[in-house]
Amino acid sequence: MQIPTAQAEHQWLLKLVGAWTYENECHMGPDQPPIKSEGQQTVTQLGDLWGLFDIRGKLLDGSDMRSIMQLGFD
């Protein structure tokens, strides 16, 4: 089994590392008003090949939302 080495695409992922805020607008249909949301996202480097995303915000009903995502390149 060969251990992967970081490529240029992995270096691009490092640009995402940090603390971010986001605003989102979803259009659910032509006869409905857009739904807006906002939240925070923290991205940390996981080794040389991965980014770990911790995303927090609010759902449509106002309850808290949390999502954890791992992003890499293959």
Image: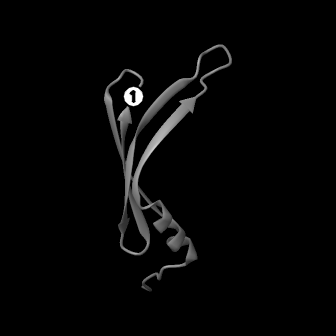
Q: Position of residue 57 (x, y in %)?
A: 37, 36
Identify the secondary structure beneath mark 1: loop
Q: Give the residue drawn at x 51%, y 72%.
A: 10
Task: Quarter of the image for the N terminus: give it.
Answer: bottom left
- Occupied quadrant, residue 25: top right
Figure label count: 1
Is any part of residue 74 visible from this angle? no
The coloring applied to the image is: one colour
- In this rendering, the answer to whether 25 lies above or below 40 is above
Is any part of residue 3 visible from this angle? yes
Residue extending farthest top: 31
- In this rendering, the answer to whether 26 lies above or below 73 is above
37 sits to left or right of 31: left
Task: Quarter of the image for the C terminus: give it.
Answer: bottom right
- Occupied quadrant, residue 47: bottom left
- In this rendering, the answer to whether 8 lies above or below 37 is below
Q: Give the residue drawn at x 31%, y 26%.
A: 63
- Occupied quadrant, residue 21: top left
57 sits to left or right of 7: left
Q: Position of residue 8 (x, y in %)?
A: 57, 76
Residue placed most toward the observer, 71 or 38: 38
Q: Give the residue drawn at x 58%, y 22%.
A: 34
- In this rendering, the answer to whether 11 lies above or below 36 is below
Q: Give the residue drawn at x 42%, y 84%.
A: 3
Residue type indicated by callout 1: Leu
Residue, disc 1: 59
Residue placed most toward the observer, 12 or 47: 12
